[in-house]
Amino acid sequence: MTGDRHRSGGRRGRAQADAAGTGGRKVDYHNLSNPFPPVGVFTDDRVMAMHETALRVLEDLGMKVLLPQARDLYRAGGALVDEDTEMVRIGRDMVAAALSTAPKSITLRAGRREKDVVLELGTLVIQPGAGAPHATDRIKGRRPGSLEDFHDFTRLTQCYDVFQILGPSVEPQDVAPQLRHYETTAAFLTLSDKVPFLYSRGPAQVADGFEMIRLARGLTPEQFAAEPHAFTIINTNSPRMLDIPMAQGLIDFARAGQVSVVTPFCLMGAMAPVTVAGAVTLSHAEALASIVLTQLARPGAPVCYGSFTSNVDMKSGAPAFGTPEHVKANLAVGQLARLVGLPWRSATGAAGVANDAQAAHETQMGAWGAVLAGATLLIHGAGWIEGGLTVSFEKFITDLEAMQVFAELCAPTPCTDADIAFEALQEVAPGGHFFGAAHTMERYSTAFYEPVVADWSNIGAWQERGAMDADERATGVWQKALRGYAPPQTNTDNIAAMHAFIAARIDAGGAPPES
Amino acid sequence: MTGDRHRSGGRRGRAQADAAGTGGRKVDYHNLSNPFPPVGVFTDDRVMAMHETALRVLEDLGMKVLLPQARDLYRAGGALVDEDTEMVRIGRDMVAAALSTAPKSITLRAGRREKDVVLELGTLVIQPGAGAPHATDRIKGRRPGSLEDFHDFTRLTQCYDVFQILGPSVEPQDVAPQLRHYETTAAFLTLSDKVPFLYSRGPAQVADGFEMIRLARGLTPEQFAAEPHAFTIINTNSPRMLDIPMAQGLIDFARAGQVSVVTPFCLMGAMAPVTVAGAVTLSHAEALASIVLTQLARPGAPVCYGSFTSNVDMKSGAPAFGTPEHVKANLAVGQLARLVGLPWRSATGAAGVANDAQAAHETQMGAWGAVLAGATLLIHGAGWIEGGLTVSFEKFITDLEAMQVFAELCAPTPCTDADIAFEALQEVAPGGHFFGAAHTMERYSTAFYEPVVADWSNIGAWQERGAMDADERATGVWQKALRGYAPPQTNTDNIAAMHAFIAARIDAGGAPPES
């Protein structure tokens, strides 16, 4: 795309097309550059006013930080800490120092170099819907998330290049809490070669996760520490609170050289002011406080700015997504993110219960908000419904189609003289058609995106095939993808070492989550 | 929104919120300014190469023009005309002359001044899905379009401010062709006070339409001629052909001072080259040729540039919409439109048969393409399915929601110091909530967009209400809107005069369409 001021074309090499969907086309869905010039909602001076207010919040009001170790770090860094109230007041000099040491570009290492992910302003990385207690599909219905569901979502994520990183799709509630992280991390490392996610549920679980990755990837401790191999999401407890596992996660990931994605979850009217400007200002203050902690723990530690800001239904308090306020918040956060200069995370989402027109509109609206905001990480890109209570296998597929369209929009559009096609225009007579033109014949097999689930047939053919809507057709698509799934190549010895580590840890009782 | 180079806020006054959907909020969905800086797909030099190629197509290859009167006008204007082949070759000087006389801003007069519509680069005007042979809804199913359907779609369009102009939703196949335009135009003029559309199906029907508008609006012939009161869509017969009724329409509308919206329908790989660049170049050439004819017929005649360019499924030839190629074509056309400088029309669309996630994604992708391209007119904004063979009452409603979100994005976002809300951030303790904060209480009733059909309730409440998806819920929404519909105030004498004219014309046999 070209914008009013800057333009960007495709970047880096072109990978193989994924098996399920793109036919003979060679498209690189892994390395995406956002083609759109960033759009904002506020004038530059109001963005500065929001930033100044966020700094004032940190200086005058402060954050409540529940973890003593974190308060110690803040204090040592120059913050004013009141141990009785656990309030930490952070000066703007500390914020400036943190932003000067946090890296502007982060390369996350995957199981194969081709699956590495670059996080910086301008890149676009998409994660499927994550963090849901429930899974649903048309075969088995809605149920508590299970390890089998977690495996299947991990396999599906592996199948589609447009999802460049792994996410904790659903909570495997059939695994005991103190053992769950072994199963989820092992699933990521054996069923996929993409960049793994780790939950921050206390230092023991985090350390287990790091060690499993180190072993499975065959890295020395020094090699592991030298580069980011994992990421976590850190949600503040808005407003203005950082709880124990989240603060601990920021410290532990920073010290290990791994990536924290700082994400205040600020629902306007609930845990944040009812205005876009107010909610985003609060989110910004909390994100800055969290980034400061990472840099106090280890200057130069990789950290992403982020926000998840939408509104609630003021009648019921229910969260809403894909609303005008959600889109505007995404765009406003992008303005602050560019001020900060770090790679950053946004998200889409859907409040709808069904995989229907509502949920599709919600997910796509939120996604456009994130993409036009210039987000580096687009989270919950596929499958998320019920405001995140459930991930749907069918919606994973129907949203996948939308994400692949975004990926196609990232690719340059041919415009040589041959593409402009004067000769073809000359060849075809007025009122004729181009089906048989040489220009068409040379290009038709790879000219267009081929859909994964969209059905373009006429109503007669559609009815003959059972009059199935997109949700119904999606069942066959994910089933076929799972049947065709092939695990990535892994090093048998490394994986065995990881399993031996897990066995020893389980023998020792595992590691319960901390909260 | 603010962009990298320009920004635009809201414009003009704020009208009453429409009855069905926006609650206590005062939002002006009628006067929309596109808030997004335009985005393109090609570099400026390649846009110029496409423009140059289009000029070369017109100069060297020419257009086949079936109407002798049009060929006479082209010849008199300096074109090289071959009467045997009906080919007309148009020089770039003629194109430049036409673009210098065509107005850059057009005000279309409605039945009330508040419903007038300004067409110029930067405004955003949305028309619901139009031109379909069939209608469908969940009650009566899919059927040939009827006058009753046409009436109902006209009433629904009147109900929602976000649709600023009327469209020929479905073809009322239960009315004889020679009488149909009386019924459709009378419906527009009695059931709505928005700007009416007229088909170009021969001079007799066009003249009838003009006279009906003149009488219903109580205008003298001079008053009618002095300002635009109606618009038509002119589809070229791509590639490079202008048929008799279309050429006649361009001439008749231009001479009457009414608006032609020039719209080559260029499906890549079918009636246009398989490349985005080639298809858009062909569309551009045909649009320029048509604009030239309007200015030869009457210099200064109001005319819109336009294009409807998407791709086909190369396996079946079926048209596709909301594809990456459709979005890219919309953006590319926008680049050429800005070169031309005229108000211009783009469109969204859906190939899907059902009102499901597929069709929602398609309509929203195409709509984003049109909006980011800076289109003045966004056509087929609601209800269009099956590639335009059917307009769905339910999809009219689910798409309406998306269009209203676009309209909300056009409105400025409050960002005063009070909106940034330092005091509210101070008032609410860490870990608390903003539900009861003074800042929230002052704003909550109007802070957020209230959905028309989206359901944000949790799965329990949703199941208790019948577990209806958005398509099912939409039935109740359009039924309620029709029940609440109130016809606009009209002048009884004027409407009687229009009906007397119709009666006389019907006595005389009506006016059969020409093709």
Image: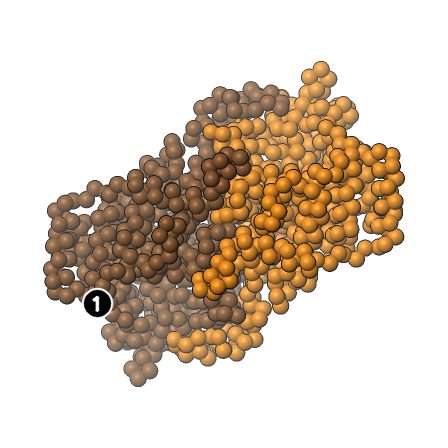
Chain colours: A orange, B brown
From the viewer's perspective, is residue A428 above or below residue A40? below
Q: Chain of mark 1?
A: B
Q: Residue at x 73, y 54 (%)?
A: A115
Q: Is residue A131 left or right of residue B452?
A: right
Locate residue B504: give its quadrant.
bottom left
- A336 or B387: which is nearer to us? B387
Which of these two is toward me, A268 or A186? A186
Percent x, y for residue B424? 53, 23
Picture residue at 38% right of the left edge, 33% below the top? B23
Does residue A440 appear in the picture of this structure? yes
Name which quarter of the figure residue B104 lies in.
bottom left
User: How many callouts does the rendering have?
Assistant: 1
Quarter holding the N terminus of chain A is bottom right
- Quadrant of the frame with the C terminus of chain A: top right
Q: Residue at x 66, y 62 (%)?
A: A19
Left or right of residue B486: residue A480: right
Q: Position of residue B67 (x, y in %)?
A: 27, 74
Q: Which residue is mark 1?
A: B512
Badge 1, how many Cα within 10 Å: few under 14, some, many 20+? some
Identified by mark 1, the residue type is Pro
